[in-house]
């Protein structure tokens, strides 16, 4: 069963276990202390405790760092590197999803540790900043940062925006936060990036829905000394040269995992379709190529369609596909919330989802709760997590670079699919919410109602 943890519950989970576990943790703490890796850990409601303050905080630090330890000491580049294991597991469906590369992992741990340590950052200011597409932080900080989104018209992009704002508010040196939405207008997307550069933004997050057309504006920003971070497998141009870094899932692994589920649940073969996002995005074609290669020969991909990652786009695409291929057995897609549109298309066509298979990238509550309503056990849905924490990771990467850190050109997570069950729906967050986001349930309710 998926769980929406509070910060307190994460602390409690880390302190559970018998005397044998405490002994192991004590020995681990001694070793970490010798390496200077347990200077502090964020626990509870954003309190930063030193390791010397209590044996319990040392236990938490050991549990957090011992199994996926960073190679940087707390305080390096102004960050901490020991979020709790429970938090990492919740955000990523398990610590195995962390990047295997040490430099990549350090940035991820820094972002998550900062987020946990500052969990109670001013939510009223965050909401106002989110609602008004930017704000002054009130810290009198000299830095400006911004998000130039190519398309902000779905709940995932709205959640990403909030994660970015929340992380920015943890840096007192940031005095101004900018946000723009190009709404799939290429000229505006380019202009938005240039405008942020002109306004002095030193870290710019962006998703290139317009594809390679964005590269000259990114490169111009980098040449001026700004740090541009892309996300969600936006592998355009040359990361590390034309822009600072790109975060995302090991997208080919995601595609092969999709294929493994299809091969398992469709042993007799059948027809499946691929749905993708905005035209020209690099993520969808990448996993589609890898999935197609790994499918059993008796499973045929009969259709591929773009949806702009919206429910309406997914509904229209699916309606057309099932009209032409009434015996369709499965769909692979890369956005959970828009998969609601897939299901609505079947309902509108009075088509049963019994024995149908969907493999999906993300786990929005809208999909999980609709699945629960359907009560169709033979309907199989598999998801990974949405990784909205990429907003925090991208910003922290830029902030670390400003103070001298070398940032890897790519930060890749290892996906692991989980089957949706009747217990996956979360009642503590709104229907458009996300259980694996680092946005408090109360703030999600305020955002989405």
Image (tube, rainbow, N blue to C red):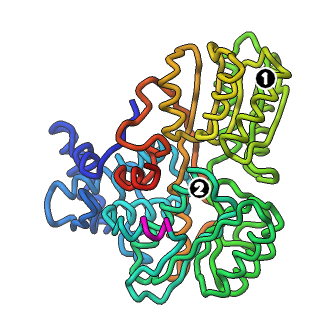
Checking the image for residue 272, the label placed there is none
User: Which mark is on residue 157?
Assistant: 2
Dot 1: few (<14), some (14–19), or many (≥20) neighbours within 10 Å? some
Residue 325 x, y percent position in the rendering: 83, 20
Query: Residue 41: x and y, percent?
Result: 29, 62
Residue 250 in the image, given as x and y percentages of width and height: 65, 47
Q: Residues within 10 Å of mark 2 (few under 14, many from 20)?
A: some
Q: Describe residue 298's horizontal placement relative to residue 365 as left or right.
A: right
245 w.r.t. 320: above or below: below
List the residue tagged with mark 1.
322
Tell me where the magenta segment starts and ends, as one range.
Answer: 127-131
Residue at 49% of width from left, 66% of height from top?
A: 130
Q: In which quarter of the image is residue 33?
A: bottom left
Q: Can residue 409 be seen in this view?
A: no
Give the vertical position of 337 relative to 166 (above or below): above
* Closer to the camera in the image, 174 or 337: 337
Q: Nearer the viewer, residue 387 or 407?
A: 387
- Could you tell me what secondary structure mostly forms the magenta stretch? helix
Q: Earlier in the sequence, mark 2 or mark 1?
A: 2
């Amino acid at each position: 069963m998926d769980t929406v943890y509070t910060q307190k519950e994460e602390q409690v989970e880390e302190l559970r276990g018998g005397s044998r576990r405490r002994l192991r943790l004590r020995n681990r703490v001694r070793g970490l202390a010798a390496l200077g890796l347990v200077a502090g850990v964020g626990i509870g409601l954003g309190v930063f405790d030193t390791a010397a303050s209590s044996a319990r905080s040392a236990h938490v630090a050991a549990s957090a760092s011992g199994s996926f330890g960073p190679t940087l000491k707390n305080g390096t580049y102004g960050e901490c590197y020991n979020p709790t294991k429970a938090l990492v597991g919740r955000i990523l469906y398990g610590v195995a999803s962390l990047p295997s590369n040490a430099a990549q992992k350090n940035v991820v741990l820094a972002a998550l540790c900062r987020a946990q340590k500052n969990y109670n950052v001013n939510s009223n200011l965050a909401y106002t900043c989110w609602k008004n597409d930017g704000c002054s932080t009130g810290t009198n900080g000299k830095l400006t940062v911004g998000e130039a989104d190519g398309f902000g018209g779905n709940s995932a992009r709205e959640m990403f925006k909030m994660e970015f704002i929340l992380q920015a508010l943890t840096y007192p040196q940031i005095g101004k936060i900018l946000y723009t939405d190009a709404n799939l207008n290429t000229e505006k997307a380019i202009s938005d990036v240039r405008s942020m550069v002109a306004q002095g933004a030193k870290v710019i997050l962006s998703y290139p829905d317009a594809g390679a057309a964005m590269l000259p504006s990114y490169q111009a920003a980098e040449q001026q000394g700004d740090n541009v971070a892309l996300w969600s497998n936006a592998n355009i141009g040359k990361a590390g040269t034309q822009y600072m870094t790109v975060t995302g899932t090991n997208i080919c692994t995601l595609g092969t995992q999709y294929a493994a589920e299809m091969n398992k649940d469709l042993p007799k073969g059948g027809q499946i379709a691929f749905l993708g996002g905005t035209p020209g995005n690099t993520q969808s074609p990448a996993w589609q190529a890898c999935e197609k290669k790994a499918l059993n020969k008796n499973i045929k991909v009969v259709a591929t369609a773009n949806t702009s990652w919206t429910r309406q786009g997914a509904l229209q695409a699916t309606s057309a596909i099932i009209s032409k291929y009434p015996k369709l057995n499965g769909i692979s897609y890369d956005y959970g919330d828009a998969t609601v549109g897939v299901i609505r298309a079947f309902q509108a066509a009075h088509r049963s989802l019994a024995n149908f298979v969907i493999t999906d990238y993300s786990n929005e509550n809208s999909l999980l709760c609709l699945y629960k309503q359907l009560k169709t056990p033979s309907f199989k849905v598999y998801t990974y997590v949405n990784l909205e924490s990429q907003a925090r990771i991208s910003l922290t990467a830029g902030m670390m670079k400003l103070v001298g850190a070398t940032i890897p050109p790519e930060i890749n997570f290892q996906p692991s699919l989980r089957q949706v069950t009747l217990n996956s729906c979360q009642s503590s967050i709104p229907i458009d919410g996300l259980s694996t986001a680092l946005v408090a349930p109360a703030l999600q309710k305020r955002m989405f109602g």
